[in-house]
Amino acid sequence: MTVDPTTLAAILAMAVVTYLTRIAGIFVAGRLALEGRAKAAFEAIPPAVLVAVIAPTALATGWPETLAALVTAVAATRLPLLATVAVGVVAVVALRGIS
Amino acid sequence: MTQDEAAAVGPNETDRARDGLRDILPILIAAAPIGLLFGALCRAKGLSILEAGLMSLLVFAGGAQFAAVELWTYPVPVLTLVFSTLLINARHVLMGASLMPKMRGFSLLQRLGAFYFLTDEAWALAERRAMRRPITPAYWFPLATMLPISWIGSTFLGAWLGSFLGDPQRLGADFAFTALFIGLIAGFWNGRVTGFTIAASGAASALTYGLAGPPWHVAAGAFAGIAAAYLAARPGDETA
């Protein structure tokens, strides 16, 4: 049960940034009316970041990971979150086994 | 939703609190295994049990936390982690702004406290509630403060169990991040524009990772995805 100072600093910085995003709405309510392209761009932020984080693993590691990511994507369209994770993990273990 | 809520007489404070707890219960149950997974993945990346729990307590934002642990290396890339957290959580600004006019009887101090607990889940429930009646402190606080209990508790438990797991790659657990993110991305699906976002972000990120290495792939992918959404949007396809 130890806490590294740099790790603590990173966690605190993440916490501050997150809290600021949470309370910012209090102060911009009524003044923030995003429409059209700007709204689409703002709504695209979460999927754009999430894809960017996993793309090296999914696309640039090897064919088992890429194929498993495709299988997972299909599962994600019809299964709840945890079942999707389970399908992905089983797929990657199986595909690595035959690679 | 229920019959007594539909009655003309508004519920009293106790009823509102009970409504909030009833609404959040399925989400508490769904969050627990995700928290277990988060804790275990933290251990696999070298974070201590306490560090994993602290992150769930202080940051309390699942998507950003999973992204942070995926990006986690030693020495800790603090700026990259903060940047990724800011980008993923920027949506809170819109969610908070949307809830503001629907929240009645909150002082500024109560709002500042209430929004610490702002999550996708609490936001979605509150918006649904607001279609029928204003969101009051008696409804919001029991609902919103239950989720951290489940999230933090399951993080600690997962981190403790993760200590016994051993090499994560053996069990395919290293791929759990990727699979989880694919599931989360599916939750943000909003038609054609999301398709362009994913394609642009994935291509730019993988390419940048190969050419420049981490952490630049996150910024490059995020920027490309956002730009693609801006360019692909047409007046007709606003669904949300």
Image: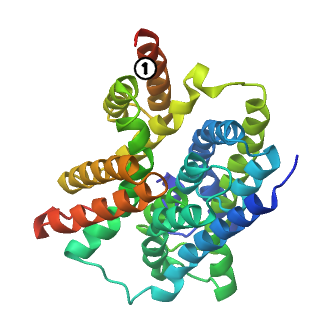
Residue B52 vs B111, above or below: the answer is above
Q: Position of residue B194 (x, y in %)?
A: 26, 53
* Label 1 chain ID: A
Give the quadrant of residue B110.
bottom right
- The residue positioned 32% from the left and 83% from the top of the image is A33
Decide which of B109, B134 is in the foreground and name it.
Answer: B109
In the picture, measured across the screen, residue B121 lies left or right of residue B19, that is left
- The residue positioned 60% from the left and 57% from the top of the image is B19
In the picture, measured across the screen, residue B147 lies left or right of residue B164, that is left
Give the quadrant of residue B139.
bottom right
Residue B181 vs A86, above or below: the answer is below
Q: Position of residue A65 (x, y in %)?
A: 40, 28
In the picture, measured across the screen, residue B134 lies left or right of residue B163, that is left
Residue sticking out furthest to the front:
B211
Residue type pointed to by label 1: Ala
The number of numbered discs placed on residues in the rendered structure image is 1
Give the quadrant of residue B116.
bottom right
Decide which of B104, A55 is in the foreground and name it.
Answer: A55
Q: Secondary structure at mark 1?
A: helix
- The residue positioned 50% from the left and 31% from the top of the image is B175
10 Å crowding of disc 1: few (<14), some (14-19), many (20+) = many
User: The C terminus of chain B appears in which quarter of the rendering?
Assistant: bottom left
